[in-house]
Amino acid sequence: MFDSLYKIFYSNPKSHSAEYLSRFSCPSAVHLPLNIRQFNRDKEFRAFFYYNQDLAIIMEKIYIQFADFTHILQNVTSIVQQQFALSSLVDEVYSTSSIEGIHSTHRELKDILDGNSNNTHFSSIIKKYDLLISEQYPLFVSCKDIRDFYDEFAYADAVAENPKNKLDGTLFRKEAVDIHSSSGKVIHRGITPEDKLIMALSDALNFLNDDEYPTLLRIAVFHYLFVYIHPFYDGNGRTARFISSAYIAKHLHPLIALRLAVTIKHRKSKYYSLLKDTDAEINCGDLTPFICGFLEFVADTVDDINRRLKHKISQLERFRRLLSKVIPGKCIKTIIMDLLLQADAFYGRGLTMNEIMSLTGKSRNTIKGKFPSLPVRTVKAISSRKKFYKIDWKALRNSLRQN
């Protein structure tokens, strides 16, 4: 495992300058049109990265894990994928908000998503992540695309949290914005003035959409640059994570995109260390360590999803064995109950009548006629007035005792 220039400066300071020149001038180096300067330091360095064995290994690891993920999905139903996506969306919104210090609960977010709450807080973020499930990926080509997205995604919440977050520039902020450590110390200042900010963000977007480079590498580079540029007074982190997720959803799969922030939250200290170390003057603008670290997050995300799906599938099979003791054989009753089992195991919201009709190919009257003899209860959504049908586990346990 190679060391960052930041680490080399402290472990072997005599070789630091030579190592920087070697990396910066090597044939595999890619130089970016943006300079990196640590807050309160005079020197700035041209941002660059270089292809090395570590990058190759981590990218190979991601695609091997993705092949395993694809194999798992080929052996589960569409309802399992849909319900797992809903569960992941709730986890993702909770995690990306928590990273920013915005507190919510899984129950609160789930109620908003299911239509069981009139609370509009978080609804804009949930709606945007819901687009990834339906594979409606927003475009990020120009600075205006970024601003238009931000207006719908995070602006209202940012201003509600602090009126000083109101944007005052042509597209972004006009004044400087500082990022503080947990102790209150300023550790980074976003690019100013706005015209320089717009130029830097335009260059970052051009790289993000440049097919000459591998997609995952482009996503990692843009993620760092966006946070470094810091175009808004607030909400930069959650916006950067969503853009990363949108491109991962399109390149790999929406389910992977819907758990990236979950991984970052669990490794938050490493995430912030990567950002801080990459900013450092002694790191000399080398983005390679950040790219490797970010791609490790992606690899960990895919690995975590694979383990979760396998665990949920195993859990579903145990439920099915229990159900077979109550309703033996294969009939419309077992089909309905199996669908509700899948929904319960992978999310827990239940299914609407239209969903059950679509999945079984049976009429409303046929399905309703079976409900009185099944351990099923209904939950009515407050805002959407939908009815969700769920397994009544108390009734099911009673049936198991009788059998």
Image (cartoon, helix red, strand yellow):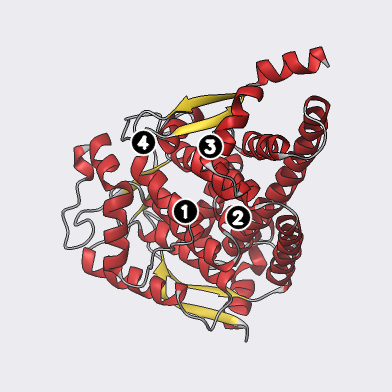
Q: How far is the residue under mark 4 from the one under mark 2?
A: 28 Å
Q: Secondary structure at mark 2?
A: helix
State the SS at label 4.
Answer: loop
Q: Are marks 1 and 4 in contact (CB under 8 Å)?
A: no
Q: Measuring 50% from the left and 65% from the top, which residue is drawn there?
A: 247
Mark 4 or mark 2, which is nearer to you? 4
Rate crowding at label 3 as few (under 14), some (14 to 19) or many (20 or more) other CA atoms within 10 Å. Answer: few
The residue located at (21%, 62%) in the rendering is 171
* Front-lying residue, 241 or 257: 257
- 195 over 94 or under it: above or below: below
Q: Earlier in the sequence, mark 1 or mark 4?
A: 1
Would you call the spot at circle 2 few (<14 residues within 10 Å), some (14-19), or many (20 or more)? many
Q: Tell me: 120 left or right of 95.
A: left
Which residue bears the numbered disc 1? 241
Q: CA distance from mark 3 to mark 2?
A: 38 Å
Left or right? Give the position of 184 relative to 371.
left
Q: Which residue is mark 4?
A: 384
Chain-order first, disc 4 or disc 2: 2
**Residue 32 or 64: which is nearer the viewer?**
64
The answer to which quarter of the image holds residue 292 is bottom right
| Closer mark to the observer between disc 4 and disc 3 | 3
- Closer mark to the observer between disc 1 and disc 3: 3
Left or right: 60, with 16 as reference point:
right
Q: Which label was assigned to residue 121?
A: none
What SS does tag 1 mark? helix
Residue at the spot of label 3: 365
Disc 1 versus disc 2: nearer the observer: 2
Nearer-N-terminus badge (4/3): 3
Sequence-earlier tag: 1 or 2:
1
**305 or 83, which is in the foreground?**
83
Residue beneath disc 2: 256
Which comes before the other along the chain, label 3 or label 2?
2
